[in-house]
Amino acid sequence: MKSIKSQPTIFIIYGATGDLCWRKLAPALFNLFLDGWMPEKFTIIGTGRTPLSDDDFRNKMLEGINNFSRSGKAAEPQWQLFAGHVRYTAGDVNKPEGYSNICEIVESNSKEWNAKPYVIHYLAVAPTLFPVIAKNIAANKLNDEGLCRIVIEKPFGHDLESARALNQLLNENYREEQIYRIDHYLGKETVQNIMAFRFANSILEPLWNRNYIQHIQISVTEQLGVEGRGGYYEGSGALRDMVQNHILQLLCLIAMEPPVSFRAAEVHNRKLDVLTAMRRFSPEALRSTVVRGQYGGGWLKGKEVPGYREEPDVNPSSNTETFTAIKFFIDNWRWQGVPFYIRTGKRLAESSSLISIQFRDLPHFVFPPEAIDSWQQNRLIISIQPEMSIRLQLQGKRPGLDMLLNTVDMVFDYKTSYSSYTPEAYETLLLDTMTGDQTLFMRGDQVEAAWDLLMPVINMWTNKPSVNFPNYSAGSWGPELAEAMIAGDGYHWFSLPVNGKH
Ligand code: BG6
């Protein structure tokens, strides 16, 4: 069991007046406190450029908690107890002397607690500030090897070169064991369950390979558009925003070899093996197995929504992709020849993240053709959100006097199997930064391997702006080319029925 009760801890949030702190970090820290996970002695320090009093910052946190916490509005007595641990100090993070107030609080807490605290530096800031803050923390000697950890939000780099430079800078000032590169997908309950499901059951492993699996799909679709983040998204796009991190991490969890143990280094090594074995794109593959799209105006949930190029802070002739679909291969013994199709996009018909594993066809069909009522090859569906479930689709006999085969689902659904609450991804990950468990974080070499794989796509898209953007309507399932790519191999994109309809 994780326990940090007796470990005095100071949690410093850089960029504390920003959206991430408000929406995610404040509710997560408060829920950890409510559930008894926070240390007995802890201080949360918010820091940013804006001058705020401790109370102003506490009120801002409370607003975030009341709006976004899974446990609803904060009850007054618990909030007052929690608020007593929260401080704010304004400072210019660009200058080494901007950290003096933080140093003072660390110093005075150490005296009061009569112990050297663990110090977690959480960089919830624009990526351009990662290097200077990382350096200045070290310049202020707040990077003690045994006690300090630094948490870096995504995006980790903009391309391979910048990711390498950031890794190098971090490695000059911190040991790898101190660096926590966050990918919030890895903290999701259903994503963690992929490892439990694969490696705590013996019946799957014999089937989990090219001999039994025909193809795999990873589909992360969103109805949301860029939600006021046009400025950020313009420099990012779907590939950098979702594929380089979340989707490749999901793919690694599905494709990795069983680790020797659940220790962080073992898990990281096996994931790196997958990224290293992924087939590099040939010029022909870049043409035929990579699709990009950008949404135009359309209708979603009965409302008319603007196209991407009409969103605030977006260039009216933008070349940024809001959708991508790619076919990957992994050149190793387990996966040779099995296509991994991924797709992700904004303003699509449904919001859903799921992984579909389709097994091979029957070697021989013993029933007469008229026995088929509905037919589907065996499929395992791991639904990450909004439904949290794992379904195995099998063929069965429909009750009746005729032999009629149809598809039935064996379902493990969180809602019916567990009555306990599901923590938010950030709760799991913040606790892990405090307990010092890096299993659900990305190691530097993994991040670089993911960039390395995608650089040919990035370069091609940069050098050849799209001539047909926008090429899908908001509210659709994306560009026709994405359908055509998978249909060319004889498959179609899988989605779970919503209200009984596909
Ligand atoms: C973030 C991306 O990392 O993940 C967003 O920057 C995206 O663009 C979000 O919307 C999706 O996360 P979730 O948890 O809502 O699926």
Image (cartoon, rainbow, N blue to C red):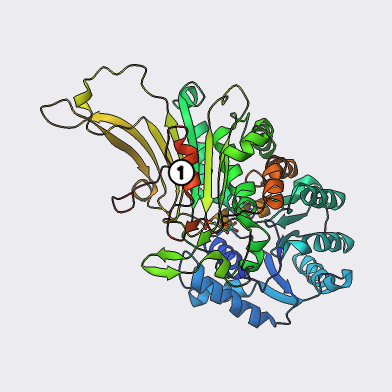
**What is the x, y in percent for residue 69?**
50, 67
Instruction: Residue type at mark 1: give it.
Output: Glu
Q: Residues within 10 Å of mark 1 (few under 14, many from 20)?
A: some
Q: Residue at x 42, y 54 (%)?
A: 386
**What is the x, y in percent for residue 89?**
75, 76
Residue 430's image quarter? bottom right
Q: Is residue 68 visible?
A: yes
Most foreground residue, 110 or 17: 17
What residue did someone put label 1 on? 483
> In what element is the residue under mark 1?
helix
Q: Is residue 281 visible?
A: no
Most foreground residue, 268 or 445: 445
Mark 1 close to ligand 1, CB under 8 Å: no
Direction from residue 145 to residue 220 in the image, left or right: left
Q: Residue furthest left?
A: 401
Q: Where on the image, by quarter, is ligand 1?
A: bottom right
Most foreground residue, 326 or 181: 326
Q: Residue at x 60, y 21 (%)?
A: 333
Q: Residue furthest front?
A: 467
What is the total number of numbered labels drawn onto the structure image?
Answer: 1
Most foreground residue, 180 or 370: 370
Quadrant that contains the N terminus: top right
**What is the x, y in percent for residue 20?**
62, 66
